[in-house]
Image (spheres, rainbow, N blue to C red):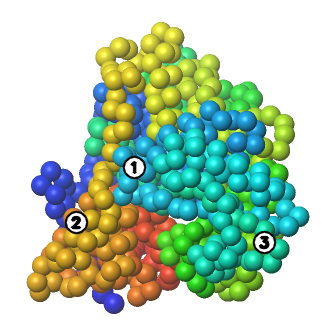
Amino acid sequence: MTSPTTLQSVPALGTHPASGSNPSRAETREQLARASYDLLVIGGGILGISTAWHAAQSGLRVALVDAGDFAGATSSASSKLLHGGLRYLQTGAVKLVAENHFERRAVSRQVAPHLANPLTFYLPVYKGGPHSAAKLGAGVFAYSALSAFGDGVGHLLSPAKAAQDVPELRTDNLKAVAVYGDDQMNDARMALMTVRAAVDAGAVVLNHAEVTGLRTTRGRVTGAELKDRLTGEEFGVDARLVLNATGPWVDHLRRMEDPHAAPSIRLSKGAHLVLKRTAPWKAALATPIDKYRITFALPWEDMLLLGTTDEVYEGDPADVSVTESDISQILDEAAFSVRDQQLQRDLITYSFAGLRVLPGGPGDTAKAKRETVVTEGPGGMLSVAGGKWTTFRHIGRTVLKKLEELPGRPLGDDFAPVSELPKRLPLPGVANPRAVEHRLLVDRPAPGPRMGADTARHLATHYGSLAFDIARLANEHPELAERVHPDAPEIWAQVVWARDHEWAETPDDVLRRRTTLTIRGLATDEVRARVSEVLGKKQ
């Protein structure tokens, strides 16, 4: 394996003529402290990122900060789906499902086809289950109709045919299988590409920068005091308007503005397990547990993703974790439709939990709508929370529309309204991933190192056309063409790219979110130490 000293010596390289390395943290801190912004977005989850992206597109001067990494909490702990929400049909939310489908298809077809991929779902109907075959068959047909049959026609399939595509499907008492289509993604990569889009549109961003207080002018919130959690440096940002998009921490920041602020949200924990696969899966399983809940078994990143749980969470958001009870529940629920040999605990490579932000109020969290909550504090700070990954673009546009309509127009009039923004602006790297994969394998310069087929596929589906810049970096520095771990497709050029172009500051930034090594169970002490050396940081 390549020595860390050699890797650290590779200079920060930007191979696209119009690009270079990102500014240093010191340069970004100075820029944030020196300038005055129209909008300061606090919170680098997908909701804050999408708002910053759309606001920057409109011509506003935008700053975005997060106490941790971009998509470091809930936004990288989802079920990795872009979906219409099949279960919403039960409550009669037909319009909502149609809107979700519209956004899903826009993202997967025009905005980010390099980061999303279609996935066929099998909904098994077992004897004694909560739903009949006729009901589910009608449901998936209606579901596909609401997406204009863009993913085929929802229908019923025989258990024998389904078992050919999913060998680990449990067939005892299986009456039928309903089939429908949705899309899948790597949520952390989607979020990072949206950060990059926001920066390309003019936003200034900084992760690992914690808000320690709010700045006020004549009773109005006009900025924030921050601390760089990596260096200890303290600085501040001035802004005409501050948007609190801190997800599970939204009420914590609201209380900085108003110590007496009443709770506006409640939290629901969703836990997931990642396992090695014992057989190939050509479809995902969505198995009804009861009238409202579904458990997923999803082929993802050459592994199997199981989940999720849905229970009220009242602790510190920073302490959310997967418990033994969560593991048992997920495995027990998966066993309804997945064979035991695929559910052995020694196959588990990783587990993670995220917090759904739901509107405050009583009732079962599993039945609660995934709505976006917008509140305004006495100092004029706007707080926004909730929603779902599928509609991240719509949420960004909705928040920007709200900013346009604020009384007194604190942002002025000199910016483009939402109605004038591009409807389906692609994320950076947009390309046909199959074409990118083919080019990576065919266009290698002699006598450069031969790229593995799995690496080419991985680069194409995680970076799109930006994969060519990473490949060029590996060709120019052959030591960067080596795999980070022999059992994973990632190469060292991705670590350098993450450091120079994707705001990676810590080993976890690289191993958990810019790559999949942690999720694969391959972030060994040796790998972490070498990544740390590349980043120029000490463990």
Question: Would you say 292 lies left or right of 352 here?
Answer: right
Residue at (24% x, 77% y) in the render: 441
Callout in the foreground (1, 2): 1
Q: Specify few, some or many for label 3: CA neighbours under 10 Å numbering under 14, 14-19, or 20 or more.
A: some
Name the quadrant of the N terminus. bottom left
- Contact (Cβ within 8 Å) of mark 1 with mark 2: no
Q: Which three-letter amino acid code belongs to the residue tagged 3?
A: Leu
Which of disc 2 and disc 3 is earlier in sequence? 3
As drawn, the label of residue 174 is 3
Q: Which residue is mark 1?
A: 109
User: Considering depth in this image, is 38 or 105 the residue closer to the camera?
Assistant: 105
Q: Is residue 235 above or below residue 406?
A: below
Q: Which mark is residue 468?
A: 2
Q: Label 3 to label 1, Cα distance in Å?
A: 34 Å
Q: Amino acid at mark 1?
A: Arg
**Residue located farthest toward the right when viewing the structure as drawn:** 128
For this orientation, the residue located farthest to the bottom is 1
Q: Which amino acid, mark 2?
A: Phe
Q: Position of residue 209 (x, y in %)?
A: 46, 48
Where residue 290 sits: x, y (%)?
A: 83, 56
Q: Position of residue 510 (x, y in %)?
A: 42, 67
For marks 3 and 1, the one nearer the N-term is 1
